[in-house]
């Protein structure tokens, strides 16, 4: 449906990857047990020097592995846990990246702008992402406007971000977790996106406009994959002034596919 390129992952315990571009992908894994409500395994970021970052985080109190992992594609990576126990992976691109597909399909988006997951302790996550990793606040807001439900922390030197999903109940349902733990591909126009989706057999819910104006001022269109995870297609640029706070970083743009 999304037109992303399917490539087997290179790690020993990996599953299959669907690449939005030559670096960004969604990886599907077999869960350790059936029936788990939380379907998010980890979120990953790119780094120019995995070993230097591993050593730096270790010196600042983060539990790190004794060495980076080197995969068949030449990539260097390591895994840590954020202050709430979520897995976060950092990867240095290898010398043998995936080859350009010989028969590429037309992707609905070639840039994953952000990923989000449930957060309980904002201060602890801010120390991890802001103080240690150099992320900065990109936007925050909520519904109603006097409440902060969502916090967007933008990567240093880039336009992508991680989103804290705040104020979920103590024991969220599968549907609530599937909505909060999400990924967001970027598009120029959700109206054009809807036309492409419908040409591929997708149909919106009867009597409901799937195109939504978020309180952040950007148009979006949400899909839910067969496993219950939300895919939040979002326009790169806002169409109105955002609620609650201004943007404090550069807006993302489309990426070259390969």
Image (spheres, rainbow, N blue to C red):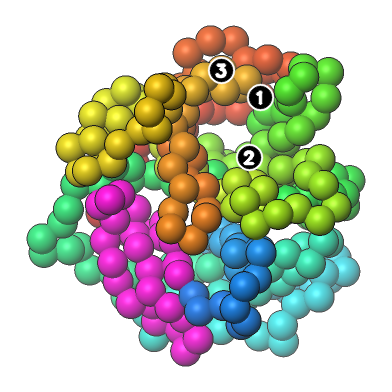
C-alpha distance separating marks 1 and 2: 9 Å
Between 111 and 190, the one lying in front of the other is: 190
Dot 1 or dot 2, earlier in sequence? 2
Q: Secondary structure at mark 1?
A: loop
Name the residue furthest top.
240
- Is residue 71 covered in magenta? no
Position of residue 77 relative to residue 256, above or below, is below
**Rendered image: mark on residue 217:** 3
**Rendered image: mark on residue 125:** none
Q: Residue at x 77, y 63 (%)?
A: 82
Location of residue 30 in the rendering, given as x and y in whole percent from the top left corner: 50, 79
Q: Tell me if I can see residue 11 in this picture.
A: yes
Q: Which residue is mark 1?
A: 248
Location of residue 10 in the rendering, given as x and y in whole percent from the top left corner: 39, 81
Question: In the drawing, does residue 243 fall left or right of residue 12?
Answer: right
Q: Secondary structure at mark 2?
A: strand
Q: Which residue is mark 2?
A: 154
Q: Tell me if I can see residue 253 in this picture.
A: no
Position of residue 213 relative to residue 171, above or below, is above
Count of numbered labels shown in the rendering: 3
- The range drawn in magenta is 1-28
Asked if marks 1 and 2 touch (Cβ < 8 Å), the reply is yes
- Is residue 12 covered in magenta? yes
């Amino acid at each position: 449906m999304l037109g992303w390129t399917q490539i087997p992952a290179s790690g020993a315990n990996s599953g299959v990857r669907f690449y939005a571009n030559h670096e960004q992908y969604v990886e599907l894994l077999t869960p350790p047990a059936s029936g788990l409500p939380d379907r998010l395994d980890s979120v990953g970021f790119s780094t120019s020097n995995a070993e230097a970052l591993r050593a730096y985080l270790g010196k600042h109190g983060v539990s790190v592995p004794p060495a980076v992992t080197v995969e068949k594609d030449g990539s260097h990576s390591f895994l840590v846990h954020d202050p709430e126990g979520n897995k976060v992976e950092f990867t240095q691109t290898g010398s043998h990246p995936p080859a350009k597909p010989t028969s590429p399909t037309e992707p609905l988006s070639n840039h994953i702008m952000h990923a989000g997951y449930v957060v309980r302790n904002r201060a602890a996550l801010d120390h991890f992402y802001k103080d240690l990793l150099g992320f900065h606040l990109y936007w925050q807001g909520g519904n109603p406007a006097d409440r902060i439900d969502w916090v967007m922390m933008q990567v240093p030197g880039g336009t992508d971000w991680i989103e804290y999903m705040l104020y979920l109940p103590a024991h969220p349902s599968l549907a609530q977790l599937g909505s909060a733990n999400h990924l967001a591909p970027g598009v120029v126009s959700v109206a054009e996106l809807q036309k492409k989706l419908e040409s591929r057999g997708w149909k919106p819910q009867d009597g409901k406009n799937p195109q939504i104006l978020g309180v952040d001022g950007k148009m979006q269109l949400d899909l839910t994959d067969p496993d219950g995870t939300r895919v939040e297609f979002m326009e790169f640029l806002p169409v109105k002034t955002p609620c609650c706070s201004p943007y404090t970083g550069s807006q993302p743009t489309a990426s070259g596919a390969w």
